[in-house]
Every structure is written in structure tokens, then in C-alpha cells.
Amino acid sequence: AQSVTQLGSHVSVSEGALVLLRCNYSSSVPPYLFWYVQYPNQGLQLLLKYTSAATLVKGINGFEAEFKKSETSFHLTKPSAHMSDAAEYFCAVSNDYKLSFGAGTTVTVRA
Amino acid sequence: DTGVSQNPRHKITKRGQNVTFRCDPISEHNRLYWYRQTLGQGPEFLTYFQNEAQLEKSRLLSDRFSAERPKGSFSTLEIQRTEQGDSAMYLCASSLEDKDTDTQYFGPGTRLTVL
């Protein structure tokens, strides 16, 4: 079964600084990959989705992710962090119809 | 287009009691999923419906758990004889079957606390 690993359970950035969240996947076939964000006591909101149409995927709220097959990675970035980006972020891979999630990365933004 | 809704949002119960959660998917979505999320972890798949048919149940779903989607619209998840280990956030998601892969849209979740 396909799986993802998120590197770093916590990331702290200054407001205005680059946000980089790391995700590596394990898959024997071209994967479908997702990034979701979760605010406290809420469900998951889709940020972006990779389906092989383009290696650089742009999402909502200024986030983007780049699919790199050679590195089996799908890292999430945002050029300039905002206080509202403080949340938990999950990388996921589709196994047929169900999603397998990483353990999540909590982002805190320092003023 | 309203999103996925779940009720109740919070449930506190005593060990041994039965609880039932409801999920209303996005109206045209034919697929519905239940996930469980414990503190500090990512969601884990529990079960999946295509229309009214339950097509897969995870090993995480013990005999005390049952899910239904009687008319292919809303779904219920029942936990019988709750245990403290059942305390978690229960998330519902729905999707429209797609030729590539579905995009799942999640509800706000039901947080269960078993005392």
C-alpha cells in the first residue's frame, strides 16, 4: 500500500518568512497526493492536489507544492507566512478510494 | 453548495453507553467515508460507502462499530458499549466518483469523549 511520511512534527516560522513542510511518499505506481490543513477543533480543508497533470501545483491561500519523482517528495511551500497559517498540515496519498495520511506537521507563526 | 455536515459536534458519554453520529455529505456526492483521528495523529480510514453499499471496513472497525447509509444520502456511525479507547475525533468525508481520483471533502468532525 502507498504511504506518506511527514518530516518534522513541528515547524516554527516568523511572520513573512518562507514556510516549508516536507512530505515523502512511497508508491509503486504514480501516486495521487494531497495536502490538507486542519485548524483547531475543525475538519480538514483541501489545500491542493497532485494528479500528474503538472509537477508544480498551486493551491489556496498562497500555498504550492512540487512533485519530484526522483526524490519521491511532495513538499508544501508558501513564500511568506501569515499569522492565519498557524494550523496542522497533513500530507496524504490516495490508495484507490481511501486516503492514507501522514502524522501531520504543526505550524506556529511568530510575530 | 453546502459542505459536509456532522452532528453532533461533541459527544461526552460514559463507558458502556452506545452513541450514534450522523454525517450529511455534499448532495451530489455518491461516495462517503468515515475516518478516526486521535490526538496528534493523522486521520485513519474506517469505512467507505459507494451509494448505499458499504464496500470496505478497516480492521480498526471492531464488531462494536456499525455504519449505514440507507438511502445513499446521509450516513450514521454507531459505537456500542463504548470504551475509553474510542475517544477520538470522527471525521466524515464525501466525494464524487472521478475517472482519476476523487477529491474528498471533510466535515467538521464529531469529537467523542468516553469517561
Image (cartoon, rainbow, N blue to C red):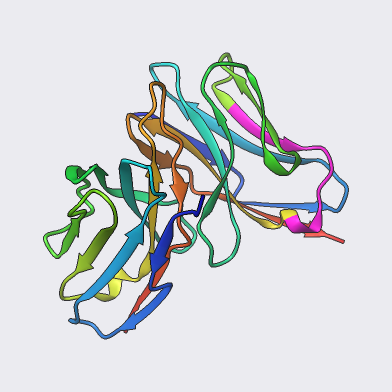
Q: Position of residue A39 (x, y in %)?
A: 60, 60
Q: Residue A91: image x %, image y %? A: 53, 40
* Rendered image quadrant of residue A93: top left
Q: Is residue B21 left or right of residue B52?
A: right
Placement of the N terminus of chain A among the 4 image quadrants: top left
Residue A37 located within the stretch drawn in magenta = no
Image quarter in which the C terminus of chain A is found:
bottom right
Left/right placement of residue B104 relative to residue B20 reads right
Q: Is B57 displayed left or right of A97 in the figure? A: left
- View extreme (left): residue: B63
**Which sits in the foreground, A22 or B46?**
B46
Please say if A64 is above or below B10: above
Q: Magenta region: which residues?
A: A74-84
Relative to B32, residue A43 above or below: below
Which residue is at 72% across, 36% downward?
A: A77
Q: Residue at x 14, y 65 (%)?
A: B64
Quadrant of the rendered image containing residue B115? bottom left
Nearer to us in this view, A109 or A63:
A63
Residue A44 position, x and y percent, is 52, 52
Residue at left offset 41%, top offset 76%: B10
- In front of the other: B104 or A81: B104
Q: Please determine whether, in this image, residue B31 is positioned above or below residue B108.
A: above
Residue at 44 percent of width and 55 percent of height: B4
Front-lying residue, A18 or A97 = A97
x and y, in percent, of residue A107 in the image: 68, 54
Give the vertical position of A54 relative to A77 (above or below): above
How many numbered discs?
Answer: 0
